[in-house]
Image (cartoon, grey):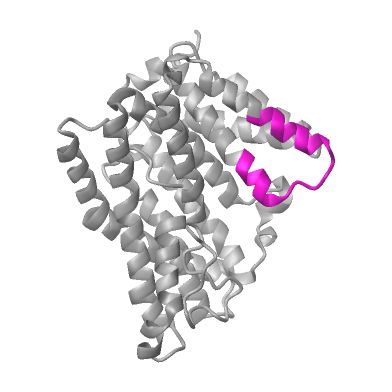
């Protein structure tokens, strides 16, 4: 029996997009347990095995899912609704996290007297930089000064790439490219060739350039899967073959390109798998964005308070606190914003929860 098409999978009443994003967000927290304490991401076991940390693999999954869902959002809603939906999904949570981390957590953790902390221009530069350019390496005055990384919101850098990809989808829609099912696949192919060519040159690829190719490549593969949903099938044997190919090509110029492509295809396939279309993986609450925003500052705080503790010792309280704060963010900020979105758009929202940031 042939595997169902992506379009057929989307017709089911449930999917695993929300649950999968939740697990990816938790994977990022697990990954950061190592880098927060040591300052070296390569201390994580998976980084030595694959060349990338668990957190980087999780971000890859986020961008594949985002490319699929965001393209679906524009295709079904239109440009005006798309802009409103994207803005109300991203901004309220980000603004709240920035203000809470800078004005509440920062005030509690700073080594400076409170009056001096609030007078320091660095505090207001931090707020401005985070909200306008998603600056993730900025520090707060006297906060986490003894940690390997002083930045209190070290994960928001991915929002820059996410927003750029959102704008790319919007531009593609304005140009009529979403009606051409090959458009996203062509972009993905061009990025894959560029990445493979850069690796084949044997020059050391700067991390920033790799990221600038990696994330749009994965996002565009997700978009391509949606645009070609009537024809594309993702049989398990194909996915297993891609994983085997990654193992066999490790250390070759094609490894990274194949790895990123395989992760994008596998991420969407898992979210649409019939066996995973169950209620526990399709919860009403989407905590992934809150976990993404608050996991890092909570882990930074725990390490600042107990600097001698091992990553494994700090991970359980970090996960527990992050889940609590993420739930508060969802019920207090994100869900009300989604309701405002529904009222602003004047129509029923998509059944699938849309991404809010990797």
Query: 313 or 205, which is in the foreground?
Result: 205
Residue at image x 31%, y 37%? 83
Q: Position of residue 84 (x, y in %)?
A: 27, 40
Magenta-colored segment: predominant secondary structure: helix
State which quadrant residue 85 falls in: top left
38 versus 340 height, above or below:
below
Q: Is residue 10 above or below residue 22?
A: above
Residue at the image point whose x is 33% and y is 41% from the top: 86
Up-down: is 340 above or below 67?
Answer: below
45 left or right of 167 in image? right
203 in the magenta segment: yes
Magenta stretch contains residue 352: no
Between 280 and 157, the residue placed more toward the observer is: 157
Residue 178 position within the rendered picture, expressed as x and y whole percent measured from the top left: 43, 20
- Judged left or right of residue 129, residue 345 is left
Which residue is more in the foreground, 268 or 94? Answer: 94
Q: Quadrant of residue 320?
A: bottom left
Question: Bounds of the magenta span?
Answer: 191-213
Q: Determine which quarter of the picture holds residue 281.
A: top left
Q: Position of residue 314 (x, y in %)?
A: 51, 70
């Amino acid at each position: 029996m042939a595997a169902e098409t992506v379009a057929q999978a989307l017709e089911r009443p449930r999917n695993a997009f929300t649950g999968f994003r939740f697990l990816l967000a938790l994977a990022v927290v697990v990954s950061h347990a190592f880098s927060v304490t040591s300052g070296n991401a390569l201390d994580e076991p998976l980084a030595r095995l694959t060349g990338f940390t668990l957190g980087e693999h999780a971000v890859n999954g986020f961008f594949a899912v985002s490319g699929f869902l965001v393209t679906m959002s524009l295709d079904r809603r239109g440009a005006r609704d798309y802009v409103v939906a994207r803005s109300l999904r991203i901004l309220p949570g980000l603004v709240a996290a920035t203000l809470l981390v800078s004005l509440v957590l920062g005030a509690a953790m700073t080594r400076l007297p409170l009056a001096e902390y609030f007078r320091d221009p660095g505090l207001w530069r931090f707020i401005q930089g985070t909200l306008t350019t998603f600056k993730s390496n900025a520090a707060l005055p006297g906060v986490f000064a003894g940690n390997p990384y002083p930045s209190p919101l070290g994960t928001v850098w991915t929002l820059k790439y996410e927003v750029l990809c959102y704008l790319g989808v919007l531009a593609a829609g304005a140009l009529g490219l979403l009606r051409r099912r090959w458009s996203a696949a062509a972009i993905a192919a061009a990025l894959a060739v560029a990445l493979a060519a850069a690796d084949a040159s044997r020059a050391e690829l700067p991390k920033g350039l790799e990221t600038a190719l990696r994330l749009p490549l994965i996002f565009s593969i997700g978009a391509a899967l949606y645009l070609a949903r009537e024809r594309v099938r993702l049989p398990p044997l194909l996915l297993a073959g891609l994983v085997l190919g990654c193992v066999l090509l490790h250390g070759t110029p094609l490894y990274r390109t194949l790895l990123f492509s395989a992760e994008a295809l596998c991420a969407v396939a898992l979210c649409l798998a019939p066996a995973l279309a169950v209620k526990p993986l399709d919860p009403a609450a989407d905590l992934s964005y809150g976990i993404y925003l608050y996991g890092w500052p909570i882990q930074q705080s725990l390490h600042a308070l107990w600097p001698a503790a091992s990553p494994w010792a700090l991970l359980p309280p970090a996960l527990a606190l992050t889940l609590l704060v993420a739930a508060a963010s969802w019920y207090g900020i994100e869900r009300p914003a989604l309701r405002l979105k529904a009222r602003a758009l004047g129509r029923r929202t998509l059944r699938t929860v849309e991404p809010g940031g990797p």
